[in-house]
């Protein structure tokens, strides 16, 4: 697989490249885009071939490809994660963020508290706030560059108005792969406070460093009466623009509530996303995904080495994802100063840590899902931008 050839995405309506100047003041002409979480790699041949076949057919009418689509999802989850999924448990949303919104809409009410373990994926809080629910931040402990949860502290925070807890597993932006004991602790917390547990597992295929992702349904089978699982092929195979994700609901009662809400809003999947998913979740897709993880692991090592050479900067050791979480607190600089050095000095657009909630103030998130040459260049640019510290 060729992950080294650069594909110029500028001028293609790419959010990642064409929007970065307006958001970060970094020109796509000479800047590096390392913010929004999509990759600069072409999709697997199995996917592009299926899209070409669909385009060449020339008719884009109503289709019903639920059976091959759901069969592929079930095959992937069983073979890659040891997770048995019933076909009737799978609901398709227009991506994972829409899935979160649908779960909030179905299982909570305006004014309810929604628990987040922060810092965490910024879209969660955005959706919660816009749905008229209240974000309840339970800040994680950064123990020697590794996030941990303090359930006793979180128990003390609960007021009784909380109705749902959202877990990011593996964690974005910290890259943690949660252990069996940690997943059990989250499930126990949800039970103690009678919370619906929403487990976002979109990064579950992008795991390395000897870690093993455990699907929450496998980790704590007895929690399924309150469990909602979120998955999608978009992070693994880089087709987020097809807006296809899955809410997988093991419990028949919760499943029926969600089904009725989907019908009430007349929501249904698009055929392009279903066909791309079925093509990706295949033996050919698995081979491509293995090669991708190996390549990203090389990017991670190269970027971590570059960050380690800059005094005051520390990247959290990732077990999963292609998102590097870099702490600038050791520089002694204000958030404005280190951010300006990255954006205007190094010419790199990276996500601001404050958007991830409490605990993210001294961080920036860098997307490493790009060509190795750009990772090396990013390290060189950062070294130059902070050369007075060396």
Image (cartoon, rainbow, N blue to C red):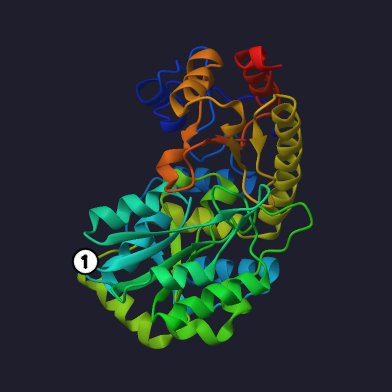
Q: Position of residue 272 (x, y in %)?
A: 43, 52
Front residue of 97 and 14: 97
**Residue located 36% across and 49% down the image:** 59
Question: According to the image, label 1 marks what residue?
Answer: 111
Do we see residue 139 in this rendering? Answer: yes
Do we see residue 65 in this rendering? Answer: no
**Residue located 66% across and 53% down the image:** 285
Residue density around tag 1, few if under 14, some if 14–19, many if 20 or more, within 10 Å:
some
Question: Circle 1 — which element?
Answer: loop
Q: Residue furthest right?
A: 210
> In the rendered image, which quarter is residue 62 located in?
bottom left
With 85 as the anchor, is 137 left or right in this view? left
**Quadrant in which the N terminus is drawn:** top right
**Quadrant in which the C terminus is drawn:** top right
> In the rendered image, which quarter is residue 13 located in?
top left
Measured along the vertical axis of the image, is residue 32 above or below residue 324?
A: above
Front residue of 209 and 194: 194
Q: Position of residue 168 (x, y in %)?
A: 51, 59
Q: Position of residue 46 (x, y in %)?
A: 62, 49
Front residue of 234 and 142: 142
């Amino acid at each position: 697989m060729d992950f080294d050839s650069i594909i110029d995405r500028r001028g293609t309506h790419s959010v990642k490249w064409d929007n970065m100047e307006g958001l970060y003041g970094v020109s796509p002409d000479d800047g590096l885009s390392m913010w929004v979480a999509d990759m600069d790699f072409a999709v697997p041949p199995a996917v592009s071939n299926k899209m070409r076949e669909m385009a060449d057919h020339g008719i884009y009418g109503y289709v019903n490809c639920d059976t091959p689509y759901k069969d592929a999802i079930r095959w992937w989850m069983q073979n890659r994660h040891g997770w048995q999924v019933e076909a009737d448990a799978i609901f398709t949303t227009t991506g994972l963020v829409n899935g979160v919104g649908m779960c909030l809409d179905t299982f909570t009410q305006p004014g309810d508290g929604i628990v987040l373990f922060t810092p965490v994926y910024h879209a969660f809080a955005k959706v919660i706030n816009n749905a008229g629910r209240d974000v309840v931040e339970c800040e994680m402990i950064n123990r020697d560059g590794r996030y941990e949860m303090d359930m006793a502290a979180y128990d003390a925070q609960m007021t009784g108005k909380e109705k749902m807890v959202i877990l990011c597993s593996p964690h974005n932006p910290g890259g943690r792969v949660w252990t069996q004991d940690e997943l059990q602790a989250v499930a126990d917390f949800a039970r103690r406070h009678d919370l619906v547990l929403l487990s976002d597992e979109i990064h579950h295929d992008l795991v390395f460093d000897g870690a093993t992702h455990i699907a929450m349904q496998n980790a704590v089978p007895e929690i399924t009466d309150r469990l909602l699982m979120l998955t999608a092929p978009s992070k693994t195979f880089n087709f987020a623009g097809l807006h296809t994700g899955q809410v997988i609901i093991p419990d028949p009662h919760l499943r029926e509530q969600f089904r009725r809400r989907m019908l009430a809003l007349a929501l249904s999947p698009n055929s392009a996303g279903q066909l791309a998913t079925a093509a990706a979740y295949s033996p050919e897709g698995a081979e491509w995904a293995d090669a991708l993880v190996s390549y990203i692991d090389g990017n991670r090592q190269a970027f971590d080495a570059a960050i380690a050479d800059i005094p005051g900067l520390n990247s959290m050791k990732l077990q999963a994802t292609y998102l590097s979480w870099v702490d600038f607190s050791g520089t002694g600089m204000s958030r404005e100063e280190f951010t300006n050095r990255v954006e205007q000095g190094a010419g790199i657009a990276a996500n601001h840590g404050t958007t991830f909630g409490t605990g993210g103030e001294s961080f920036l998130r860098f997307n490493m899902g790009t060509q190795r040459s750009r990772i090396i260049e990013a390290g060189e640019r950062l070294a130059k931008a902070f050369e007075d510290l060396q």
